[in-house]
Each structure stands twice: as C-alpha cells, then as structure tokens.
Amino acid sequence: MKTALKWISLLALVAVILPPFLYFKGSVSKPMMSGIMLAGTVLWFATAPFWMGRRQEE
Amino acid sequence: MMSEDASQPITSEFEREPVSQSHLLGFRSFVGQYAGEHTAGTELAIGPLFVAAGVSAFDLVAGLLVGNLLAVLSWTLLTTPIATRARLTLYYQLEKICGDRLVLFYNLANGVMFCFLAGAMVTVSATAFGVLFGFRMPGLNDLLPNSVGWVVAVLSVGAIIAWVAANGFTYLARIANWAAPWMVLVFIAFGVVGLKDFMLATGSGISGWGDLVSLSQTVIWKGGEALPGQVKFTFWHVMFFAWFCNMAMHIGMSDLSVFRYAKKSWYGLATATGMYLGHFVAWISASILFALQLHLDASNTDVLPGPMASKACGVVGLLCVVIAGWTTANPTIYRAGLAFQAVLPKVSRFKVTFVTGMVAALAGMFPAIAMKLLGFVAIYGLVLMPMGAVIFCDFWLMRRFGLVPYYAEHVGLRFNWAAAVAWIVTLGVCVSLVMRGVIGLYFVSLPGWFVAAALYLLTSFLVQRRRVTGVQIR
C-alpha cells in the first residue's frame, strides 16, 4: 500500500513540474498547465502525508 | 531549529549536555532540512528586489554562484567543526562563554530579529489574499499600510500563524515537510513559465544557450539604474548578500544547535541544497516574474509575490505563496518565542509564542520590512555576527593565547564583559562605518568579524589578567 502511495506521490510531482516545461515548448496552454499542476498538487498533499516521515514516527 | 525528523523542536533534548553518539544523524537528514528551510516565502520577495536594484544578468548569476559557495564553506569550515566537537546548543555554549545574564541580551536581540523576519513572511502570505479579495496592497516604496483590507488580511494571517505556532507547532512542521518537495518544484515552475512569458512578450525564441543568454542580458536583467529608493546592486553586492544573508546561522553560529547532531563535520556541505535550490533557483525564478511584470508595465514596481505567482501558475502559485510564507513563519515565530521565553521564564510558552506571533503580524502590516528585506537581512546578520566571532575565538584561539576558554563557566561569571564589549563595540564600529559612508551595509560584516575577534581576545586578556591578579592579591 505504502509503495503504491509513493508511486502516486511521485506521479503527482511529475504533474506539477512537467506542465510548465510543456508550456515552455508550446505543447499546452497556460490554463491547461495550471489545471494539471493543481491536480498534481491535490494528489501530492492527499498521498504524501501517508508515507512521508512515517518511518521516524514509528 | 528542527530535530532529526524536522517535526520536533531540537530544544527538547540535550539542552545542557553534548548530544550522545546514539543520537547522531546521517548526511541525508541535513540535505532535506536545508533544502526545505531555505526555499521560503521570503525568497519570493528577495528575487524581485534584485531586479529593483538594477542588477545585470552576469552580476546576478555569478554573484549568487560565488556568494552561495562562500555561505556553504562558512557552514562547513566555521560552524560544523565546532558543532561536531562540542556538540552543544548555541545557547549553552554561549552561556559557558558569556554567562547567563549576557545570553539573555543575546536572546532578546535574536527574538526581535526573528520577529521582524516572521513579519516579512506574513507579509508575503498576505499578498496572496490580495489577489483573492482584491484589496489595495502596498507598493515598493510604501512604509505604512495603505488599505483596511491589507491590515485585516495581515492581522488575520498573523493571528492564525501565531495561534498555530503557540499551539500546534509540531503539526504544521509536518505540513512543512510534506510541502517542501512540492514547493521546490513550484519555484522552478515560476522560472520556466516566466521565461516562456518573456518569450511571448518579446516575440523572441530560445533555440539554444546563446538565445537564453541574450534574452537574460538584454531583457530580463538589463542592469542599469536601480528603481527609485533602491540601492544599485553590482556583482559584489549580490555576492556578499548571498554569503551573508544567513550570516546569523553560519558565521554567527546559530546552526551549532542543528549540526551538533551531525556525525561528521563535512556535513556542512548539505547546506548547498538550501543555497542552490532556495537562494539560487528560487531567487532567479522570482526575479524573472518581477522583471516580466516591469517589462509589461514599467510603472508597476510593486513587489507583491501573490499577484506575480498567480499570473504565472494560477491557483498553485497562490497556494505556494501562502504555504511558503506560512510554513517558514511558523518555526520562525516559534524560535522567537523560545528566545523571549528565556528572558521571561515564568510566563507560559503558549502566551509568549502567541504574543510574539502577533507582534510579528503587526510588524508584517508595515510593508517597510518586506520591501526593504535586503537591507533588513543584512542588519539581522550583522547584529548576531559578533557573537559568532566570540564563539570561534573562544573555541580555537583562547588556549593558544594563554587564555581560559568557557571563562564564565570556569569562574562562575554571569556576565562576561569581554564578550559584551566585543559585541557592542563591534556593532558600534560597524554602524558608524555605514552611517559615515565608509563602507556599505552589505559588506561591513566582513571587517566587523575581525574587529569582534580582536576585541574579544584583547578584552579577555584584560578581564582574565585582572581577575587572576585579584585572586593573587587576596
């Protein structure tokens, strides 16, 4: 479960950083870029708390 | 300062004893902590102020590369060698050298500085609410709040931050941890989007390194005169600013409390993550956004991270401004509260921290601090730097000169005049040099360190000789 969450979190970070570069290349519009970044942000904050820093707490 | 999981204040353990071997931490703990801590809300104000200071592309990039390298070396060669040998908190080490009464004055100075710094972070966060609610926000040269909406926003943001710092510091420290990787990426995104918007605004394309350099030199960081009311920045200003903006932490030795947990003294190199992500990438990204704003409307000189971030990345940009300001203001207020609590030990930590937070909010209401952040950060380092020189000399040089280190502890002093004279006279000399125009504010801490070191050794010689003579007479 934790491994799956980590992969989803990683995907979320990709969704935050990739769209600006696609916008730079002209592949996506700015509203599209902002929307994907927002989805990535929501996904990151929804998944990261379940595995980040957990090891130390345990 | 944060502990190993960056969620517990380090002050909870080993306050008055060296850190034990079993609690030492690996290199990675410091890499993450510095990357997160130095990608803060204030970076969004500092980057634009470089552009307002009329910096050129070469001066900015070269100055930041060299200045940040010097900062990393200062941590590695000055702070961590002492931290990993003594393994004491800054406050306990200072108490052994200066006596507890002088440390109270140091705490007071430290607390006041943290308060103003947190105020600037509250200011940054509040600019995001200006975008949402459309109230009037302060301009580059405004010293006072200029709308009711601004006052209400800053006080509201400040009150929430103060309450959380006083009540739930640990929880927000966790949120700060979760936010750190995301925030670094959003800062990078600001730069990439800003660059693309520049290309669209100027009609230029970037097909290679040469085009990027040309755009940077001719459009983004053109150099020339600073905006009215700002000091003109050259390579030397940028380099010294990047080196000294965290002077309180490295040369001033505040981070002894952090690196006392490091296994090896070379772990100071971990600070490079904070310097090159926060103080290079984030500053450059934020400065691109402000340069774009000026390019589109030369009369719009307002340094308002909220609107700039919103134009670049929409809601995510606004979230970044709020979270970056909030997560860094929170521990800063907590630290300020701890410093003040040492001065007022009978008052509860909750009350002290909450009042400290509200004072920070009041300070943040006045845009003078955030708009003059470059100067304030230089003053912050200058005020705490002399005590770093005192610790350095006490640790490495006292025995070589036949003097007794940790003198206050050795003879039971509560106020070591040698350290007090080194601190106060150095500040007096530095302020006088700046006021008379002999040397600029951004540079004065370098000669100031040598003045403090020489004064401490000289006055220690006088204090210790007098005391020994007194003992012999008795």
Image (spheres, rainbow, N blue to C red):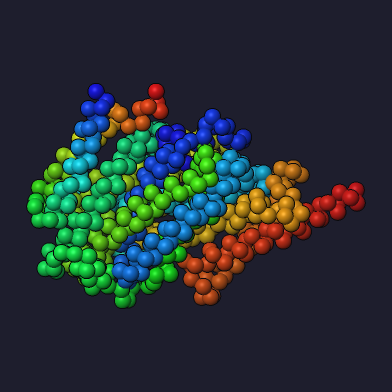
Could you tell me which residue is drawn at 62 percent across and 58 percent down?
B423
Image position, residue B192 (x, y; %): 21, 56
User: Is residue B155 in sight in this rendering?
Assistant: no
Q: How many marks?
A: 0
Image position, residue B230 (x, y; %): 36, 70
Q: Which sits in the foreground, B202 or B309?
A: B202
Extreme residue toward the right, this view: B473
Q: Quadrant of residue B54?
A: bottom left
Q: Is B212 situated above or below B29?
A: below
Could you tell me which residue is drawn at 37 percent across and 66 percent down?
B62
Could you tell me which residue is drawn at 20 percent across and 61 percent down?
B195
Image position, residue A9 (x, y; %): 23, 34
Q: Quadrant of residue B176?
A: top left
Image position, residue B214 (x, y; %): 22, 71
Could you tell me which residue is drawn at 64 percent across and 60 percent down?
B453
Q: Which sits in the foreground, B218 or B252?
A: B218
User: Is residue B289 in sight in this rendering?
Assistant: yes
